[in-house]
Image: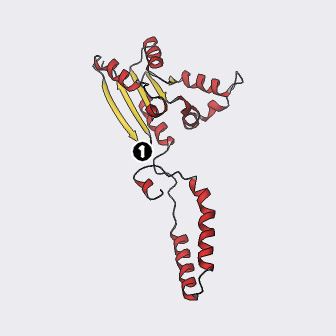
Amino acid sequence: MFAASFSIPMFIDRYLIYLTPAFFIVFSIAISKLDNKLFISFSLLVTILMAISFTPISNNERDIKTLVKNVKQMQKDSNSAVFICPDYLVFTFTYYYNKDYFTATESGIPKKDIVSSLRSDHVFLVKNYKAVDSIYNANSYDKIIYVDAAADFAYDKNNIKSYLNNAFQSKSASVDSLHVPGIFNIYSYQLGK
């Protein structure tokens, strides 16, 4: 799983926490079963060399931090709305978008206050195209940014992307897309002026 994750993202760093003790237990049992002192010396040498050369990569650009950085860049200097699906990405997205939103708790319901703070920045959590339609038609945005975090898996038949494609097809809009490694796709629809 770890080796395959370099091409297909499936291994999460936190898995190492659970695998490390088992690795060392199995490794020590294997060494204790051997009687050959030369093999034990060689094993210790290899282990020391592995420990010296171990340099973990803490950011392989497969995280939500990269997604938020790209969304902020697209959102900058434009009258834009950001639609995020699935909506349960709210806490992770908000953490990298603006940590201060976690402390703004006027109503006493943290999720409600975070969603309200995001709406003030024109960031909306949606489950289907009907929510996108009602927000888009009630406002006059020049740019729509759609963050798709495997939305079809979470809400099959959400039809958000097809709705946006159809809505902007006849308005001479430019469409850009960006894939952030992992499960994230960002679609940007810019109205022609």
Say whether residue 28 is left or right of residue 63: right
Check the image and report above or below for 149 versus 59.
above
The number of discs equals 1
143 in relation to 55, above or below: above
| Residue closest to the eye, 163 or 57 | 163
Instruction: Identify the residue at image location x=57%, y=54%.
Output: 15
Residue projecting furthest to the top: 138
Q: Amino acid at mark 1?
A: Pro
User: Looking at the figure, which quarter contains the C terminus?
Assistant: top left
Q: Residue furthest front?
A: 33
- Looking at the image, residue 24 lies above or below residue 128: below
Q: Is residue 104 visible?
A: no
Q: What residue is at 56 percent from the left and 25 percent from the top?
A: 118
Instruction: Give the percent coordinates (x, y) of residue 94.
Output: 57, 33
Task: State the scheme by which the image is colored.
Answer: secondary structure
Q: At x 55% / y 22%, what residue is drawn?
A: 119
Which quarter of the picture shows residue 47? Answer: bottom right
Left or right, 150 with respect to 37, comes to left
Q: Which structural element holds mark 1?
A: loop
Residue 101 lies in quadrant: top right
143 or 40, nearer to the observer: 40
Q: Closest to the observer: 77 or 10?
A: 10
User: Could you tell me if residue 54 is visible in this image?
Assistant: yes
Q: Position of residue 177 (x, y in %)?
A: 35, 34
Whether residue 57 sits left or right of residue 173 in the image: it is right
Q: Tag 1: Cα neighbours inside 10 Å, few (<14), some, or many (≥20)? A: some
Residue marked by disc 1 = 181
Q: Quadrant of residue 150?
A: top left
Above or below, 116 against 36 in this view is: above
Q: Where is residue 48? Give x, y as percent.
A: 56, 75
Furthest toward the right, the residue is: 108
